[in-house]
Amino acid sequence: MIPAAGPGLLTGLREDLGSRRIGSGQARLDEYWAAGRRVESDDPDGASILCYVAQWVDAGWRDIDVVQEGLRTFPQGHRAHLPLVDFVHVLMAEGMVWVHEELVQRALGNFNLVLSLKAEIADPQLVSLAHFWSSRCHRKAGEYDVALSHAGEGYRFASAAGMQPMAAAMRVAESWLLFQKGRTKDALKLLSEAEAVLRETDDFITRGNIQSSYGRMYRREGRYDLALRHFAHAIEEYSRRDAEHRNLARSLANMGYVERLIALQLRKRIDADAAQRRKSEPDLRREYEEMRRQALEHLDRATSIYALHSNHRGAGTVCVNRGHLHLDSGDLHAAEDEARQAYTLGDEKQDFILMARAKLLECMVQNTKLEEGIEDPAWVAHLALETARESVEFSKRTENRRLQARSLIWQGLTICNTSSGSTDAAREICDQAAALLKNEVQDHIWEDLQTLKSNVVRGGNMDSTLQGWSQGVVGERTFQQLTEDFADLIIPKIWDHEGRKVARVAKRLSISPKKVRRVLARLGLHGA
């Protein structure tokens, strides 16, 4: 019989986890495994040790098969005979395995059951972990409100247990959720506080997560150089624990995404230089090609790492990012293949975020085919409308506002491209997307929204619109929205009539030139 682990191992694992002493905890487990010991159901502490082994696997020790092997000693039919505390620990370990396998709803069933028994458990550290894992599950499902609630509870219980470093690690998850809900200032505050606590630990995975969060926040603000710098720092941190950690692959995918956005900016400059016959165009083109090469290289490396972990969300995200790069270069066939691969990966796990992104990419491909007259126009238009509709439906099953907005924008653009008489429908969709992006930074998604607004204004019938307003037919629009619509209708017309002179329009209407430029820029008619 394998010797029992004894209470010393369990106590050490709990304390090291709470203090985020990662090297110490891993050394304990290495010593235990080197002695030929394993998790066994006949060990009085076996179930508890299995639960904490699962936590240590998540922290970077060994692979998930260690937990799966331990679970086999606690088969389903025999768990009813376990003491309550052992049963709860087995549920936690099993839930963690299901999270790894991306079976989010099954995992939530376990964690919800654990939390329903928290009054009986009387273990704040364990309750904190159950809240933390529940938060991760809801976040993966795009359910940000409930995920944020669980993250806050996880922090509260960890703090009550006197485990401030563990509480700080949970703050990182809470910070990201606040950012997703548009509370960037609050998110940065929590992230900074967590960084100050964890800086003195060897929790390189969480420290990498902090750098990755900074990178994604700066990316949202369009500060791409800073974003790349933080993603590089994240990769350095992850590599100190595991050179093939799945989170490292995520940062590589994020780098590829940012490099694509930089490449798009360079292409706009190339087009402008070509139009004005500037000598800088060849240098910009070389920089553009190098940025694309780096993006593809980072995505390829991310793919190889995700393959080791069988991570559907990560692999699908890489497919979507690579598909956009192919779309940018005009390789529509490759872009369409990547979109379909991403959808298949998402569909296997019912990952609505990934499914929505995949259908959105496919919608963009179909719209490009329409613009370039590729394949049967009627069939392509049908596919474009259908994939746009599916992307919107999948996105609405999440709380990801930016994904919802982007799906709506492309549904509106598709309607404008395929149905010239459906301006009212496109305008309504445009309003919904604008509401979702309210107070957002002016990034590439915002630019797509301006394109949609321009198409809606140009495709509308001014006489019928004004007639409807005069009869009180304004739908759900507020007075401010009606004012903006009126400006969008009138100012471009007067701008044309006044020889496209901003100063003359401003004088004619007794408004500031800044207001005129803002309206024209919003419609894509003056300045970008």
Image (cartoon, grey):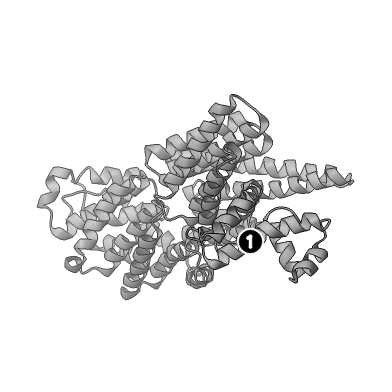
Kind of residue at badge 1: Phe
Q: Nearer the viewer, residue 6 or 215?
A: 215
Q: At 56% from the left edge and 30% from the top edge, which residue is drawn?
A: 380
Q: Residue furthest left?
A: 81
Q: Position of residue 464 (x, y in %)?
A: 59, 51
**Quadrant occupied by the C terminus:** bottom right
Q: At 51% from the left edge and 64% from the top edge, which residue is drawn?
A: 182
Work out whether residue 223 can be spotted: no
Q: Where on the picture, by quarter, is residue 165?
A: bottom left
Q: Secondary structure at mark 1?
A: helix
How many numbered discs sit on the rendered protein? 1
Work out whether residue 403 can be spotted: yes
Q: Nearer the viewer, residue 325 or 228?
A: 325
Q: Please tell me whether residue 231 is drawn above or below residue 304 in the rendered image.
A: below
Q: Residue furthest top?
A: 376
Q: At 37% from the left edge and 41% from the top edge, which residue is drawn?
A: 349
Left or right: 166, with 369 as reference point? left
Query: On the image, numbered disc 1 is attached to which residue?
Result: 486
Q: Position of residue 304 (x, y in %)?
A: 52, 38
Q: Please tell me whether residue 442 is drawn above or below residue 294 in the rendered image.
A: below
Q: Position of residue 189 (x, y in %)?
A: 51, 73
Q: Nearer the viewer, residue 375 or 296?
A: 375
Left or right: 289, with 356 as reference point? right
Q: Position of residue 413 (x, y in %)?
A: 58, 44
Pointer 1 local density, CA inside 10 Å: few below 14, some 14–19, many at least 20: some
Q: At 81% from the left edge and 47% from the top edge, which residue is drawn?
A: 272
